Image (cartoon, rainbow, N blue to C red):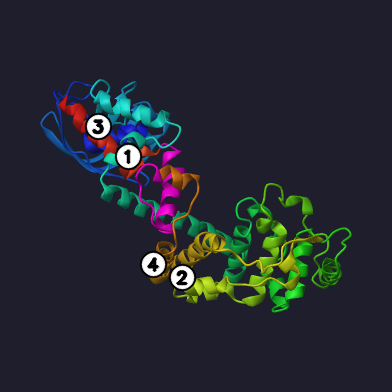
Amino acid sequence: MKEDLLHFIWQYQYFHKEGLQTTDGKPLHVLFQGHLNTDAGPDFLNGKVRIDDVEWIGNIEIHVNSSAWKDHHHEQDEAYNSVILHVVFSNDDNVYRQDGTMVPVLELKGRIFPEIIKKYRAFIQDEGIPCLSRFAEVPEMIKLSMLDSVLSERLERKSQKIISELERNNNDWEETCYQMLASNFGFKLNNDPFLRLSKVLPYKIINKCSGNHFQIEALLFGMAGLLKGHFEDEYPRALQKEFNYLSVKFSLHNKQMSGAEWKFLRVRPAGFPSMRIAQLAALLVRHQKLFYKFVESGSRKELYSIFDIATSPYWINHYTFDVLSDTKQKKLGKTSIHNLIINSVVPLLAAYGKQKDIPGLVDKAIEFLEALPAEENFITQKWKKNTLKLKSAFDTQASIELYTNFCLKKQCLKCKIGVNILKETCISGASI
């Protein structure tokens, strides 16, 4: 038995109520189960029960075993003096309030509808999405409501992470934006080295070379550790020479990364770290105040134009140093731009809107997600196969959050979809 299942059972009163009594034999009637408390303190607030013809109004605490009351030291906490009923699966000990009075106990063992326990166990034993077999039965409005809810949670979590980074960056939004973008230029496989690059090469140094494409490339490639050794081509040799000068000028010596940190294997040439660094350099050259350009963008078209960048001429026929490639301007593809907007721009706007209390910016972030096409990955494919309609990046981001933080963690009783299925199980179980 899990405590969150007991919470669910008590919240919806899914147990047999005939002849209810406390563990010391007093007749008990539940008049109101109380409101679920998601903060510290007793689990349900302002409940109402009648014990032995006396009505009590107060809070209700839930535990699997009654002895957990002592394990959690509730007898020493005045917040639990207002508990009028201790609801447990198994009563293995008497418990007392801070003033020494005994807390009435209701034991639910033997009273819970068996179908709900059976269904819940099936949920938590499933290695994938627990509710797939009955997912299509859930009303569309409940699915949409859950997607809205988890998308808000996802944006809130990402916003808090950004604000924490902002504090470490002395409230410098441009520096924080630069780090966020750099990390996501790694497109998962190279996220960590890109983030590290942004830390060893701060934006304030990039800014000192504002508009100088050659110097910014020299700094990025040099600090990435990719300008070490001998090169055949003149361009990387020139970058190498320029970096040696800049590293002394900006006191960057001994801070360079190792070239071995970058992953080239199993990466298509268009996604080589060298190619992504060249594209990042182009972006930083073209826009000196990227963060405020994102804030001021009013449409998806404006955002696209920010990422419409051209690398320096060397990269027209190279993906990496000294190796010729097909000749073409290697711009960021639409999928890459969508990825950067979804994972960098949207969270940044949401975080800035929350920190500055500008609700319109949070709304704008959500509107950008609604305007972008649905993402394609193994998680979204799982949902599509099971009738969840994913029309935009708003839907796919929500579905990813639902899968990673509810389905995989078996948080079915905190999910409106899971609760709906279990409620239906209880109703059918009660009618048997």
Which of label 1 and label 4 is nearer to you? 1
Which residue carries the number 2 mark?
Answer: 300
Q: Are marks 4 and 3 in contact (CB under 8 Å)?
A: no
Which of label 2 and label 4 is nearer to you? 2
The N terminus, quarter of image: top left
Q: Is residue 37 visible?
A: yes
Q: Is residue 92 left or right of residue 300?
A: left
Q: Earlier in the sequence, mark 2 or mark 4?
A: 2
Q: Which residues are magenta?
A: 384-410
Where residue 108 appears, as percent x and y from the top left, is 26, 25
| Spatial CA span between label 1 and label 4 | 30 Å
Q: Nearer the viewer, residue 167 or 302?
A: 302
Residue 167, by quadrant, is bottom right
Residue 409 in the magenta stretch? The answer is: yes
Q: Is residue 173 left or right of residue 258?
A: left
| Amino acid beneath label 4 | Asp
| Amino acid beneath label 1 | Phe
Residue 118, by quadrant, is top left
Q: Earlier in the sequence, mark 1 or mark 2?
A: 1
Label 2 neighbourhood size at 10 Å, few (<14), some (14-19), many (20+)?
Answer: some
| Amino acid beneath label 3 | Thr
Q: Is residue 88 left or right of residue 179?
A: left
| Spatial CA span between label 2 and label 4 | 14 Å
Where residue 389 appears, as percent x and y from the top left, is 35, 50
Which residue carries the number 3 mark?
Answer: 425
Disc marking residue 388: none
Secondary structure of the residue carrying numbered label 2: helix
Q: Nearer the viewer, residue 66 or 143?
A: 143
Q: Is residue 139 left or right of residue 329?
A: left
| Spatial CA span between label 3 and label 2 | 44 Å
Q: Are marks 1 and 2 in contact (CB under 8 Å)?
A: no
